[in-house]
Every structure is written in structure tokens, then in C-alpha cells.
């Protein structure tokens, strides 16, 4: 498989946490191929599988392996070289190490690994957790700090210590604390990438120096989301703000109910996937939100 050179990966730009299509309870391979072909033609800078949007926690091992292999194969068919990361999480360091070992031969370029959830370990515990994971794979690891989902916040002191590991290459920052995020941006080493995972904060985080974003909302209007970062890189701050104002309501719409149901509803109505199915405990969008999404889709099409 034609993978991106591991040591050439410096996460930045617009990364898409791909939704995982399901149909009648199974992984929908036809829709998956269509989705990957579609986004292979879009200006994204990286792809993440089985993360929050990809409903990774509901996939079994066989499905996860199929998802990864199919996606990598489809990217190769499309002739698109794109860093492909795989979302992992767990609260038992030994089990996560085993999951890294099991995926060692998979055609991926790195991992997005969430902080251990539910048990609320200390900062020292998380430093040891991520250090053990980093030592058990040669691939790049992006830490996923999302206290409102995991119940624990990896603070900047611990984050900066972990940034010293050669294969801990960055963080998907969902700290939901602007002061913490901006402080991290001020003190981080240049090689350590901060990608926001808060879709609604993409523009402010980029203006403060973040390298990019992992943005589920960019399933929709992908080019417009990519344009915000491109304009900022070109030094056109006013143009970037105008571009951002045109799309900044999408995150509100697509996160109005638990994600990824709204995104899947949109993708289904747009003809990119064959079913909006999500796996329990996630539920389909309400009729009210479905109507709002369809109105918005019609508006864009007209
Ligand atoms: O799938 C992801 O990874 C993302 N997760 C964030 C979340 O947890 O809500 C949102 C982000 O857009 C992508």
C-alpha cells in the first residue's frame, strides 16, 4: 500500500474525521467507497477513521480492519496520497498497547488517541499512558484531548512534556477552554501541531496560530472550510473572515443533536451515502432537525 512517509507527517490544514456508513446494521462498503472517492477529490489534508464522527466505539475489530483497508485501497485507486490516521481509545494502557500491536501491519500513517476516559487518571498517569503508547509504535500519535467526553483534561504542562516524544506529533484540541488552548499555542514547540477539534473555533484557533483543524462539519462545503485556512496562509485575514462568516453556522446545525446523526442525514440527502443509519446508543435526527438540514441543503443547491 502506498503510504505517506511516516516521518514526513506534520499534521496541519484541514483534516476530515470520516463518517462510517452503515446499512441494515453492517458496514456499508458501497457508500464507503463513494465517500472516499468523493473526499479524495476535495482539498483536505488528512483523513481520520473510526474517531468520534466515525463511530469508532461501535465498530468491532473485523469491521475496523475492513474500514481501514477499504479506505486505503480506495485512496490508492483515486491516486490520492493523504495521511490516514486511525482513531483509538481506551482506559487500560495494556489493552491500547495491544490494539496498537494488532494494527501494526494496517495501511495507516498514524493514530488519533483519546485520553483515557471514565477513570479520571492523574496528569502523571496520563503522561505514563501516552509515553507507553508512544514507545509501542513507530507511527505518529496525535493526542485527542476532549475533557467533556472523557472526563479528564490533559493540562498544558503534561501536554508539553509529551510533546518531547519523537512520535507524539500533535494534539486534537477540544479542551473547550480558550485560555488553555491559546496558552498551549504560545508555549508549544514548533514541531508539535495543534489542530482544533472544535468546529466552531476553527477560524479563531487558526488566527491564534493553530496548524489546522479536524473538522467533522467539513463533510459539508469542504472547499469553503479549506478556503478559510488557505486565505489565512496567504495573509488575507479579511478574506478569511468573510469566508468564515459564510460557513460558521454549519457547526451549530450539524451539532444541534448528537453527532454524527446530523452529518449522516446530510450525507444521505446529498446522495453520498445510502442510509443515515447510526448505531445505538446514537439515534437518528429528529424530524425537526431533518427538516432544517433539508432546507439548508436545498438553499445551497438553488
Ligand atoms: O470525529 C472526530 O474526531 C471529531 N470529533 C469532535 C467531537 O468529538 O465532537 C468534533 C470534530 O468535528 C470531529
Image: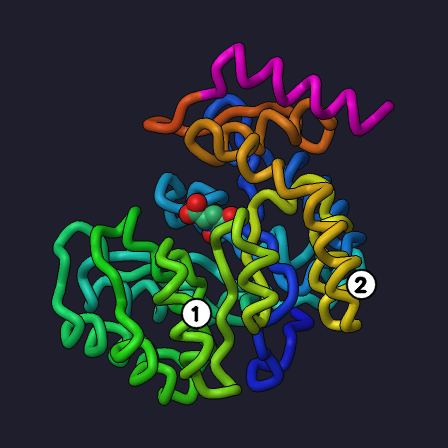
Quarter of the image containing the C terminus? top right
Main SS type for the magenta part? helix
Q: How is the image coloured?
A: rainbow
Relative to residue 204, is residue 24 depicted above or below? above
- Crowding at label 1, few (<14), some or many (≥20) Cα neighbours within 10 Å? some
The image's mark for residue 182 is 1
Label 1 CB-ligand 1 distance < 8 A? no
Callout count:
2
Would residue 284 be found to the left or right of residue 75 on screen? left
Q: Nearer the viewer, residue 271 or 75?
A: 271
- At horizontal 59% and vertical 25% (from top left) the residue drawn is 265
- Disc 1 is placed on an element classified as helix
Q: Nearer the viewer, residue 6 or 247?
A: 247
- Crowding at label 2, few (<14), some or many (≥20) Cα neighbours within 10 Å? few
Give the percent coordinates (x, y) of residue 1.
65, 69
Magenta-span inclusion, residue 299: yes
- Assess whether mark 1 and mark 2 are in contact (beta carbons under 8 angstroms): no
Relative to residue 198, is residue 105 depicted above or below? below
- At horizontal 54% and vertical 67% (from top left) the residue drawn is 108
Would residue 97 be found to the left or right of residue 33 on screen? left
Give the percent coordinates (x, y) of residue 138.
43, 82
Q: CA distance from mark 2 to mark 1?
A: 37 Å
Residue that carries the numbered disc 2 in the rendered image: 79
Is there any visible trace of residue 295 in the rendered image?
Answer: yes
Which residues are the magenta region? Answer: 284-302
Pair 2/1: label in front: 1
- At horizontal 51% and vertical 25% (from top left) the residue drawn is 277
- The quarter holding residue 264 reads top right
- At horizontal 49% and vertical 44% (from top left) the residue drawn is 54
Relative to residue 188, is residue 106 depicted above or below? above
Amino acid at each position: 500500500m502506498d503510504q505517506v512517509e511516516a516521518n514526513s507527517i506534520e499534521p496541519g490544514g484541514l483534516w476530515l474525521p470520516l463518517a462510517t456508513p452503515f446499512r441494515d446494521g453492517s458496514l456499508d462498503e458501497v457508500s464507503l467507497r463513494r465517500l472516499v472517492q468523493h473526499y479524495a477529490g476535495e482539498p483536505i489534508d488528512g483523513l481520520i477513521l473510526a474517531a468520534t464522527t466515525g463511530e469508532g466505539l461501535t465498530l468491532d475489530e473485523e469491521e475496523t480492519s475492513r474500514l481501514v483497508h477499504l479506505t486505503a485501497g480506495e485512496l490508492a485507486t483515486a491516486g490520492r496520497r493523504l495521511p490516514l490516521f486511525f482513531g483509538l481509545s481506551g482506559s487500560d494502557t495494556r489493552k491500547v498497547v495491544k490494539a496498537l500491536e494488532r494494527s501494526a501491519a494496517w495501511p495507516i500513517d498514524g493514530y488519533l488517541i483519546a485520553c483515557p476516559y471514565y477513570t479520571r487518571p492523574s496528569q502523571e498517569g496520563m503522561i505514563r499512558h501516552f509515553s507507553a503508547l508512544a514507545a509501542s509504535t513507530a507511527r505518529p500519535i496525535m493526542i485527542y484531548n476532549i475533557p467533556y467526553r472523557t472526563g479528564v483534561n490533559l493540562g498544558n504542562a503534561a501536554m508539553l512534556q509529551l510533546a518531547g516524544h519523537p512520535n507524539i506529533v500533535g494534539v486534537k484540541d477540544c479542551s473547550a477552554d480558550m485560555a488553555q488552548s491559546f496558552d498551549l499555542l504560545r508555549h508549544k514547540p514548533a514541531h508539535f501541531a495543534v489542530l482544533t477539534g472544535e468546529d466552531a473555533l476553527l477560524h479563531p484557533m487558526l488566527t491564534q496560530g493553530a496548524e489546522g483543524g479536524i473538522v467533522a462539519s467539513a463533510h459539508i462545503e469542504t472547499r469553503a472550510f479549506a478556503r478559510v485556512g488557505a486565505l489565512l496562509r496567504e495573509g488575507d485575514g479579511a478574506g478569511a473572515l468573510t469566508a468564515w462568516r459564510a460557513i460558521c453556522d454549519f457547526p451549530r446545525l450539524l451539532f444541534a443533536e448528537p453527532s454524527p446523526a446530523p452529518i449522516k442525514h446530510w450525507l444521505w440527502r446529498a446522495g453520498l451515502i445510502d442510509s443515515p443509519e447510526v448505531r445505538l446508543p446514537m439515534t437518528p435526527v429528529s424530524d425537526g432537525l431533518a427538516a432544517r438540514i433539508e432546507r439548508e441543503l436545498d438553499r445551497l443547491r438553488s
